[in-house]
Image: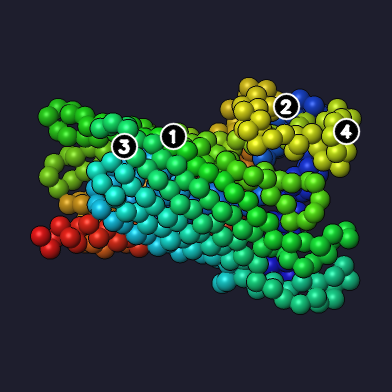
Amino acid sequence: MRMSLVVAFFAFISTYSNAQINVCNEQGVNPVTGNPCTNTIVTSVPFLRIIPDARSGAMGDVGIAISPDANAMHFNTSKLAFADQELGISATYTPWLRALGLQDVYLAYLSGYRKLDDLQTVGVGLRYFSLGVIQFTDENGQPLGTDRPNEFELSLAYSRKLSEKFSAGLAMKYIYSRLASGQVVEDETITPGNAFAGDLSFTYLTPLEIGGVDSRLMVGTSISNLGTKISYTQSANRDYIPTNLGIGVGWEYDIDDFNSINVAIDINRLLVPTPPGGDPFSPENNNSGDPDVPDYKEQSVIAAALSSFSDAPGGFGEEMRENTYSIGAEYWYDKQFAVRVGHFNENRFKGNRKFFTVGLGLKYNIFGLNFSYLVPTTNQRNPLDNTLRFSLLFDFGAFEGAER
């Protein structure tokens, strides 16, 4: 029963969202209280936005402009062109909903890159999300069998330096989502969802000298998961995948030969339509195309991304509330031991995710190990509450250097 609720959430999340909006007027305001309405942007396949890296997970989920490793495949593929090593691999395991006692729900992520020469780098990533064993039942509670819903993403990337300080990256993705295949809901058979998407990113990296001490400034931006809509039935009601715009700034400062610090800030926002104020099926919000599909869902992917900067019913104030903010810092001793801390903030009317993060990192020769732990700051439950996640990294270029 507990896992059936999880599947229902993923499969019919947009329907739930629409029901929540009905208490709002067309300006996105609760007519009873006069306060802004809770108007969370909901997409399909949200597992694509789960942070897969324990290093970033310990720094408030920053990652766009921190020093590159194999996990750049998720955040910003263009910075792979500035990787120090010739070859890197990362593996991460993230338990999911562990605070609820679930043992078979998790995210696994494997990524790697290879430098072709001083200018070009290629990368690959595989993300797998398991929802565990599900017991399906009918409306009368009678068992209909069990299944193991799962989702995965396969991505390939190419990064190239366009100058000594500037690089660009492109990634292509295939997304597969199998949540309740074979089940029948309202006379429609649920099938696996498929989508294709791409990432486009840019990075600027420059050395800085402050008081005679070396430092590095990195600025990055990435549009990720720009791709086709997805559906689990033959219905015309297709959902957007979580297209995201991220901008990050990172500063790395060498205190001396043994001590260094790194501070980074990321700002992210979804490039998908904001649900309208009031009933999405009202004549004001659903007056063109298919009457069973709200107008805001009928836009093309590109049109939706462009209009996402100005479509919030609450105007500019609500548009600003749709940004999420991450800030993180790490301290390294002798490039072998790291201590990390961070904070993530999302507006209370747009999801209300707020938490602190802490973590440690160890690195020796080719081998690296990172840990992170999430500390919630609101009463809202987080799937990573009381969860320790970890990443393994292998920098084979370091091994080759040691051999020489």
* Quadrant hosting residue 143: bottom right
Residue 290 shows up from this direction: yes
Q: Is residue 217 left or right of residue 52?
A: left
Q: Secondary structure at mark 2?
A: loop
Residue 106: image x %, image y %?
54, 65
Q: Circle 1 sits on which residue?
A: 221
Residue 324 shows up from this direction: no
For the residues carrying marks 2 and 1, which lies nearer the camera in this image? 1
C-alpha span from label 3 to label 2: 41 Å
Q: Circle 4 sits on which residue?
A: 282
Circle 2: residue type: Pro
- Residue found at x 50% / y 48%: 172
Circle 3 Cα neighbour tier, 10 Å, few/some/many (<14 / 14–19 / ≥20) = many
C-alpha span from label 1 to label 3: 15 Å
Q: Circle 3 sits on which residue?
A: 161
User: Tag 1 or tag 4, which sits nearer the N-term?
Assistant: 1
Circle 3: residue type: Lys
Q: Are marks 3 and 2 in contact (CB under 8 Å)?
A: no
81 vs 139, nearest the viewer? 81
Q: Circle 2 sits on which residue?
A: 313
- Residue found at x 49% / y 53%: 155
Q: Residue furthest left?
A: 404
Circle 1: residue type: Thr
For the residues carrying marks 1 and 3, which lies nearer the camera in this image? 3
